[in-house]
Image: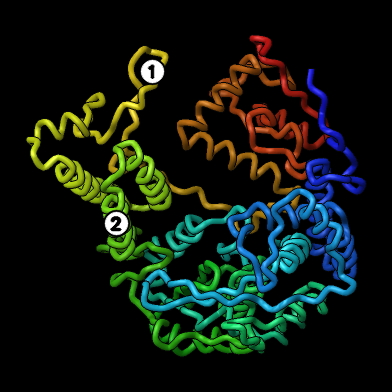
């Protein structure tokens, strides 16, 4: 018998130890406040929104989650100008108790520079102190529900549950038809994060004005010299991406109000935005040059921003354009979206460099280095026309690894090298792999093999609905449906669904009738997402579609059935 440590399960507002905080209660309280903020925002009750934000930012739960976020992310060991990090349970709990509005004064940022993707320029980053990071994370909990509710429908960057795949799918929908626009304005905002007007942010962002002004005017320290900040929001701040998004929100609505008349869109103006990168379609070059672009520039000028003359261009769809690492182009009237050539070459250079650095590594170590790179790249591009690209990358990787293997054994023949480093698995020859030393249930030795990028399946992405809001409980059923479809798309997910189905004796826990292919099914969270329910098999059940509708409508609770094997 084990005895739980002292403090476990203690009420969140009376916790005396970091590990004694009731995290489930913290998440539940914050999620419910966020849902109320969404409802008040939708009703246009700004006073109510402000009051609920005050409750959240002054709650123990909000403060605890803010500290938890900044002490568990990748930058948790990176200090600000004060050199302080919170690494012990005692310091984390003390940080929670120290987060107060009264007397709070942000410290200057620590300025560092990182190389951009092209390798020729650098990007400035501002690193806040831990206390400032925690305050930003706290106020972001109160701001994000407002930002999601008021955001442009086709804005996809730095938003919960949205991805680049959604933005690319929207490009396809806007450009794929024969009647679609033929011209595209590729917009590039010059130094977006660095030039946003402070006056505009303070006047329009629904956040505590004194706190926001303090962050914006904190300045930065570089080479022991304090510099003031008169514009912009620092890249590196937790809340900065949301502030940038809210600055650009309203552009899509303005274009719709100006150029759409009901369902008519004579100029064929559509916008797809991912953070500060966006494209706008138009019926002619002149429409984009003389009508749309001046409107966009006026919108940006009000916020202290401007388009980059060198990088902003207007392109015909037959010539194609690049967006988010994709090449979007029509070939003979058919729209094809492929991986951009520059991104393919950059990825191959990275793989070759990894193999070069891995010259002294064992084969299993090199495979474990390469597999995450190959799998991640394939997952990013698996929703577009990538089959030939995957095959080309697979061949290039094979050539690289073959040369790696031959260099290790210059005095051995090709047959010996092949037998040592390559295997035949089923119908696949030349599989780069090695035995791990473990034995499978079948009695065969376990084989660690290189991820087969050429065999990656191409799957069309299911775009998120433009108005879906993860903070709104009314969208809970929709996100459950998307979870079920996402599980069907992967082998691991399908196995989990089959296990759920078998564990509940193939029947619906509500009506006790069989769940079959003809009856259909829907996933249901036993503990709702708003109550911090997780997307894990232990919190999921399969219901008939009609049963789930009845459970939602009547407010019933569902108990997860015990497994038939008693485990």
* Distance CA(mark 2)–CA(mark 1): 33 Å
Residue at x 58% of width, y 89% of height: 298
Furthest residue to the top? 565
Residue 31 lies left or right of residue 451; in this view the side is: right
Which quarter of the figure has residue 130?
bottom right
Q: Give neighbour class at mark 1: few <14, some 14-19, many 20+ (Cα, 10 Å).
A: few
Q: Quadrant of the N terminus?
A: top right
Residue at x 28% of width, y 61% of height: 345
Residue 278 at what x, y percent from top left? 49, 72
N-terminal of the two: label 2 or label 1?
2
Vertical relation: 45 (above or below) 466 = below
Residue 248 lies left or right of residue 273; in this view the side is: right
Q: Give neighbour class at mark 2: few <14, some 14-19, many 20+ (Cα, 10 Å).
A: few
Residue 63 at what x, y percent from top left? 81, 57
Q: Nearer the viewer, residue 153 or 113?
A: 113
Residue 166 at what x, y percent from top left? 51, 56
User: Which label sits on residue 353?
Assistant: 2
* Residue 35 visible here: no
Q: From the image, tell me which residue sits under label 1.
A: 439
Which quarter of the figure has residue 527?
top right
User: Which label sits on residue 177?
Assistant: none
Q: Nearer the viewer, residue 415 or 90?
A: 90
* Residue 93 visible here: yes
- Secondary-structure class at tag 2: helix
Residue at x 56% of width, y 64% of height: 157
Q: Quadrant of the C terminus?
A: top right
Residue 540 at what x, y percent from top left? 67, 30
């Amino acid at each position: 018998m084990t005895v739980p440590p002292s403090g476990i399960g203690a009420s969140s507002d009376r916790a005396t130890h970091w590990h004694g905080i009731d995290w489930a209660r913290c998440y539940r309280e914050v999620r419910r406040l966020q849902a109320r903020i969404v409802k008040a925002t939708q009703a246009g009750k700004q006073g109510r929104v402000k009051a609920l934000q005050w409750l959240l930012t002054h709650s123990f739960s909000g403060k605890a989650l803010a500290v938890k976020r900044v002490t568990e992310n990748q930058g948790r060991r990176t200090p600000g100008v004060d050199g302080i990090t919170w690494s012990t349970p005692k310091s984390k709990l003390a940080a929670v108790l120290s987060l107060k509005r009264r007397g709070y004064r942000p410290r200057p940022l620590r300025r560092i520079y990182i190389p951009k993707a092209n390798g020729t320029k650098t990007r400035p980053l501002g690193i806040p102190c831990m206390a400032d990071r925690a305050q930003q994370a706290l106020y972001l909990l109160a701001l994000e529900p407002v930002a999601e509710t008021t955001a442009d429908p086709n804005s996809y960057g730095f938003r919960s549950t949205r991805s680049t795949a959604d933005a690319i799918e929207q490009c396809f929908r806007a450009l794929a038809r024969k009647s679609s626009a033929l011209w595209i304005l590729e917009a590039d905002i010059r130094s977006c994060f660095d030039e946003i007007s402070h006056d505009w942010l303070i006047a329009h962002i629904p956040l505590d004005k004194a706190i926001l002004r303090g962050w914006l005017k904190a300045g930065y320290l570089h080479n022991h010299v304090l510099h003031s900040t008169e514009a912009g929001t620092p890249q590196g701040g937790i809340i900065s991406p949301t502030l940038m998004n809210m600055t650009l929100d309203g552009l899509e609505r303005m274009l719709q109000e100006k150029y759409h008349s009901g369902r008519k869109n004579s100029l064929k103006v559509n916008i797809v935005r991912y953070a500060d990168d966006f494209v706008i379609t138009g019926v002619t070059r002149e429409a984009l040059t003389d009508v749309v672009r001046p409107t966009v520039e006026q919108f940006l000028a009000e916020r202290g921003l401007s388009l980059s003359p060198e990088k902003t261009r207007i392109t015909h769809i037959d010539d194609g354009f690049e967006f988010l690492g994709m090449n979007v182009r029509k070939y003979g009237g058919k729209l094809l979206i492929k991986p951009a050539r520059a991104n393919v070459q950059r990825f191959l250079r990275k793989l070759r460099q990894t193999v070069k650095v891995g010259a002294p590594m064992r084969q299993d170590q090199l495979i474990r280095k390469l597999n995450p790179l190959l799998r991640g790249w394939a997952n990013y591009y698996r929703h577009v026309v990538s089959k030939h690209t995957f095959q080309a990358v697979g061949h290039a990787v094979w050539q690289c690894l073959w040369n790696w293997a031959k260099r290790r054994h210059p005095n051995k023949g090709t047959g010996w090298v092949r037998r040592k480093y390559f295997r035949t698995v089923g119908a696949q020859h030349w599989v780069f792999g090695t035995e791990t030393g473990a034995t499978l249930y079948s009695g065969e030795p376990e084989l660690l093999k290189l991820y087969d990028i050429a065999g990656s399946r191409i799957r069309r992405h299911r775009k998120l609905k433009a108005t879906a809001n993860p903070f709104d409980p009314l969208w809970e059923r929709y996100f459950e449906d998307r979870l079920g479809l996402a599980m069907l798309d992967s082998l691991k997910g399908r196995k989990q669904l089959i296990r759920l189905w078998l564990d509940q004796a193939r029947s619906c826990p509500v009506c006790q009738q069989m769940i079959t292919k003809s009856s259909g099914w829907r996933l249901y969270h036993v503990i709702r997402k708003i109550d911090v329910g997780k997307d894990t098999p232990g919190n999921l059940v399969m219901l008939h579609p009609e049963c789930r509708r009845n459970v939602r409508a009547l407010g019933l609770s569902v108990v997860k059935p015990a497994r038939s094997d008693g485990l």
